Image: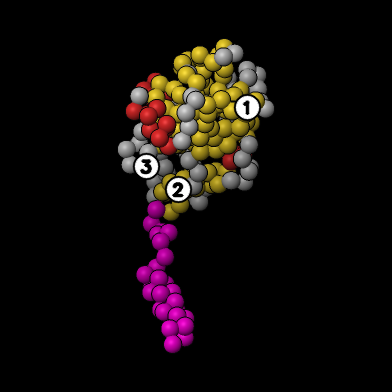
Amino acid sequence: MSEVRIAAEPRTEFGKGAARRTRRAGKVPAVLYGHGTDPQHISLPGHELMLALKTPNVLLTIEGLGDGSELALPKDVQRDPIKGFLEHVDLLLVKRGEKVVVDLPVNVVGDVVAGGRLVQTEVQISVEAEATHIPESVSLDITGLDIDSQVLAKDLKLPQGTDLAADEETLIVQIVDATVSTEPAAEESEEAAGEGAEGAEPAAE
């Protein structure tokens, strides 16, 4: 897994106004917590943090703290819904050798069987892994899967040293008949709409 060193500065001002000033200075407000310690309010360089967060579950070595450096994983990343810039980040303290639960992307590879269509119901899966050896993703090869095949969480081939944390019966992907529509028939939709209208008439009166 990737490990990135990043310098932190303590934050002594709080609130929306202070957060805006921090972001205007090219930094991102963050909170570092875990292991029963008091939360540490810090700011991190925005550009370096943005690049680091492009890697899922990146391990950060936070430097510049009073007690030296700390290892942390991003747990909650808040972005501006329109412009996409980082607004705030929650970081979880971890130690080497410690097991943590994280969500890994499920990357589907291979070709769908002729006449079939892939339906992926889960794009990520919860696993337990050692904090400093978190895989970047789980690969799922659908080559050879017939129509009506399903892959559950328990069927995934997880990277070495990784255990499943999600429900074993969670549906990840299925191969359906490409000629069969999964949308409700138009007649059924119209009928349902008519029933809804009839049901609403007494209330209107």
Q: Residue at x 37, y 70 (%)?
A: 186
Asked which quadrant contains residue 44, the reply is top left
> Which of the two discs, 3 and 2, sits closer to the camera?
3
The residue indicated by pointer 2 is 119
Q: Amino acid at mark 2?
A: Val
Looking at the rendered structure, the secondary structure element under dot 2 is: strand
The crowding category of the residue bearing disc 2, from other C-alpha atoms within 10 Å (few below 14, some 14 to 19, many at least 20), is: few
Which amino acid lies under the numbered mark 3 shown in the image of this protein? Pro
Say if residue 89 shows up in the picture. Answer: no
CA gap between label 3 and label 2 equals 27 Å
Q: Taking the image as drawn, is residue 152 in sight?
A: yes
Task: Please state which of the two labelled residues, at mark 1 or mark 3, is closer to the viewer.
Answer: 1
Which mark is on residue 81? 3
Q: Residue at x 63, y 27 (%)?
A: 38
Can you tell which of label 2 and label 1 is closer to the viewer?
Answer: 1
- State the mark number for residue 38: 1
Q: Earlier in the sequence, mark 3 or mark 2?
A: 3
- Side of 169 relative to 61 (left or right): right
Q: Point out residue 23 in the picture as x, y percentages from the top left corner.
A: 37, 29
Quadrant in the picture for the C terminus: bottom left
Residue 48 versus residue 156 in the image, above or below = above
For label 3, the crowd category at 10 Å Cα-Cα, with few meaning under 14, some 14 to 19 and many 20 or more, is few
The magenta segment: 178-205
**SS under mark 1:** strand
